[in-house]
């Protein structure tokens, strides 16, 4: 079935961008995630990735044109499928897709992080027993410029609009939908589930009554039923045996995966592409919101006391990892930023209580914030009201009862400030580490039986992997200096600092990877994909970040 390809939000404040070129022609097959076009903002060039599998049926814009963010740029469908003006017009009348390809980076609290004093709780002593310190205000969901202008014209408070993009990103269609739906559409999600993905109430009641029988149905059949009754669930998604979704509103991006024997319950459930839940997860909160590629391992528990109270909310950013047997308690708002790692057996609490507060015992209900890039160690515990700054590290086994500044390493019971979480590197040291990464990548391929040959110098390395289809070559240069065009099955160019002009000028059949800032463009052959996954496992995540390794050499 034909579908529109939209220009994704690129994290820029520009209303429109320059469309540079098409990378595929009409009639060519495309796969989800394949680069199909190039656009330029004021700061950089970006590749637009295909949002659907199929054939390029029609291109809706020409090189040199200015294209608005989220505007349709192409139609992708089946071979020989009709795509005349009437068909395009019909597609344009359909509601906008619920998820964009690339999310806006999620921010949790002001940056840089400035910790506020926290009264000790039941681990560190007594407190007032009340929510004595409110959570620091959180930045509102990102808003598309066109949506902001339209909301101003209509006098709509954007804080009341439910965004359907990644991490609550509010688009023009969300504002228009709120107006068309009337005043109820702008109510708080805890008051009324409405808008895209709202599930038919009778269907949801039936699923609740027969959850075991419904869970035993085949994945495709369950997803078909959810979609038929209002849920918006992206293509390529899977709902494991015994698993059910019990929510009044469901919006999931493409390739969402829920493993076997999972039960996810909420009033509102929204996620970007590649959401992953392992087996036997128990998830329960009034509102659940996940960014792109949020990964949760097996035997996770989200919920506990107060999980369905009006303030029970879990907001998780993009590209993070939560390990096995973690317990997250969102009785109050629990907000987790981008690329956060929460290791196995960790516990995060937003409420604590015991014997009577009126008899002097401690009791606390307060939200928790975990900033972008933070890491929570194995079996660590975070108590109500804690704020963990961006890039901070909590050592395994620690109990955190006070807020943690950005970039600091805390450990102990109770946890105290020990040192900076990261070492400050010179440019030379960073380059040395990059060379060491390439060498270790070559070693890992050799251990797996690949015929991999590496030649290295202080600022340049060349890795050649001989395969039946020819040589696959990866070249690292600290200063983005690459000579010649060696004939090979695959060529990957890696630079520490890849200037925008040189990055954009790399031929379309060659993969370009910049390490600082981290980014990638071009085709993703087996060598490039393996190196990208190798980098990801070492904390180096390339942009566009919404990508998953589907197997290969590693």
Image (tube, rainbow, N blue to C red):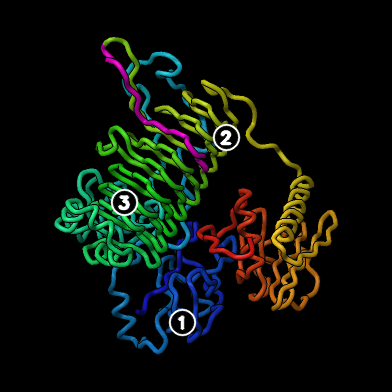
Residue 346 x/y as whole percent: 47, 35
Above or below, comparing residue 119 to residue 303 in the picture = above
Numbered disc 2: secondary structure? strand
Q: Measuring 51% from the left and 68% from the top, which residue is drawn there?
A: 33
Q: What range of the chain is rendered magenta? A: 341-358
Numbered disc 1: secondary structure? strand
Left or right of residue 394, residue 311 in this image: left
Above or below, comparing residue 174 to residue 395 in the picture = below
Question: Which sits earlier in the primary sequence, circle 2 or circle 1?
Answer: 1
Q: Measuring 26% from the left and 62% from the top, which residue is drawn there?
A: 226
Q: Which of labels 1 and 3 is toward the front?
A: 3
Residue 56: give its label: 1
> Is residue 183 visible to us here?
no
Above or below, comparing residue 369 to residue 553 in the picture = above
> Which residue in the rendered view is the most extreme toward the right?
457
* Residue nearest the observer in this picture, 107 or 453: 453
Mark 2 and mark 3 in contact (Cβ < 8 Å)?
Answer: no
Q: Measuring 28% from the left and 79% from the top, which residue is drawn there?
A: 90
Left or right of residue 180, residue 432 in this image: right
Numbered disc 3: secondary structure? strand
Q: Which of labels 2 and 1 is toward the front?
A: 2
> Which residue in the rendered view is the most extreme toward the left?
202
Question: Which sits earlier in the primary sequence, circle 1 or circle 3?
Answer: 1
**Residue behind mark 3:** 269
Distance Cα–Cα, label 2 vs label 1: 46 Å
> Is residue 300 visible to us here?
yes
> For the C terminus, which image quadrant?
bottom right
**Residue behind mark 2:** 393
Residue 338 x/y as whole percent: 49, 47
* Residue nearest the observer in this picture, 533 or 154: 533
Residue 166 x/y as whole percent: 41, 55
Report the number of numbered marks.
3
């Amino acid at each position: 079935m034909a579908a529109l390809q939209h220009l994704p939000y690129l994290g820029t404040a520009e209303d429109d961008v320059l469309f540079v070129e098409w990378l595929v022609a009409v009639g060519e097959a495309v796969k989800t995630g394949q680069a199909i076009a190039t656009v330029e903002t004021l700061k950089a060039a970006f590749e637009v990735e295909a949002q659907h599998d199929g054939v390029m049926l029609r291109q809706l814009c020409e090189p040199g044109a200015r294209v608005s963010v989220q505007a349709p740029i192409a139609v992708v469908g089946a071979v020989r499928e009709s795509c005349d003006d009437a068909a395009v017009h019909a597609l344009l009348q359909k509601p906008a897709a619920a998820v964009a390809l690339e999310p806006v980076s999620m921010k949790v609290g002001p940056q840089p992080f400035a910790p506020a004093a926290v009264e000790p709780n039941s681990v560190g002593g007594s407190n007032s027993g009340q929510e004595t310190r409110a959570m620091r205000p959180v930045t509102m969901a990102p808003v598309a410029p066109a949506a902001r202008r339209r909301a101003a014209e209509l006098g709509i408070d954007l804080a009341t609009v439910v965004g359907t993009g990644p991490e609550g990103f509010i688009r023009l269609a969300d504002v228009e939908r709120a107006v068309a739906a009337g005043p109820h559409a702008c109510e708080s999600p805890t008051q009324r589930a409405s808008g895209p993905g709202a599930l038919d109430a009778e269907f949801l009641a039936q699923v609740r009554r027969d959850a075991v029988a419904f869970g035993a149905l085949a994945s495709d059949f369950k997803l078909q039923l959810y979609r038929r009754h209002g849920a918006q669930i992206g293509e390529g998604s899977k709902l494991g045996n015994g698993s059910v979704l019990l929510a009044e509103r469901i919006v999931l991006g493409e390739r969402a995966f829920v493993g076997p024997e999972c039960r996810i319950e909420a009033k509102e459930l929204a996620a970007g592409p590649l959401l992953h839940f392992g087996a036997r997860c128990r998830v329960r909160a009034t509102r659940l919101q996940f960014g792109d590629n949020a990964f949760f391992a097996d035997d996770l528990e989200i919920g506990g006391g107060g999980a369905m109270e009006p303030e029970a909310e879990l907001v998780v950013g993009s590209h993070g990892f939560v390990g096995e047997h973690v317990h997250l308690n969102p009785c109050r708002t629990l907000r987790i930023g981008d690329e956060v790692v929460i290791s196995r057996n960790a516990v995060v609490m937003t409420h604590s209580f015991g014997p009577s507060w009126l008899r002097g015992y401690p009791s606390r209900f307060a939200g928790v914030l975990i900033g972008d890039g933070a890491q929570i160690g194995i079996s660590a515990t975070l108590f109500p009201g804690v704020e963990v700054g961006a890039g901070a590290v909590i050592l395994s086994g620690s109990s955190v009862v006070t807020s943690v500044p950005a970039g600091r390493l805390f450990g102990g019971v109770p946890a105290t400030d020990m040192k900076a979480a990261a070492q400050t590197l010179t440019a030379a040291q960073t380059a040395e580490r990059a060379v060491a990464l390439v060498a270790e990548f070559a070693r890992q391929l050799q251990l797996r039986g690949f015929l991999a040959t590496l030649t290295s110098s202080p600022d340049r390395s060349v890795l050649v992997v001989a395969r039946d289809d020819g040589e696959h070559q990866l070249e690292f240069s600290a200063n983005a200096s690459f000579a010649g065009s060696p004939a090979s099955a695959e060529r990957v160019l890696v630079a520490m600092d890849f200037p925008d002009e040189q990055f954009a000028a790399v031929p379309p059949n060659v993969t370009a990877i910049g390490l600082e800032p981290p980014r990638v463009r071009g085709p993703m052959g087996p060598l490039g994909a393996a190196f990208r996954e190798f980098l990801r496992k070492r904390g180096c995540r390339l942009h566009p970040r919404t990508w998953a390794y589907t197997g290969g050499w590693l």
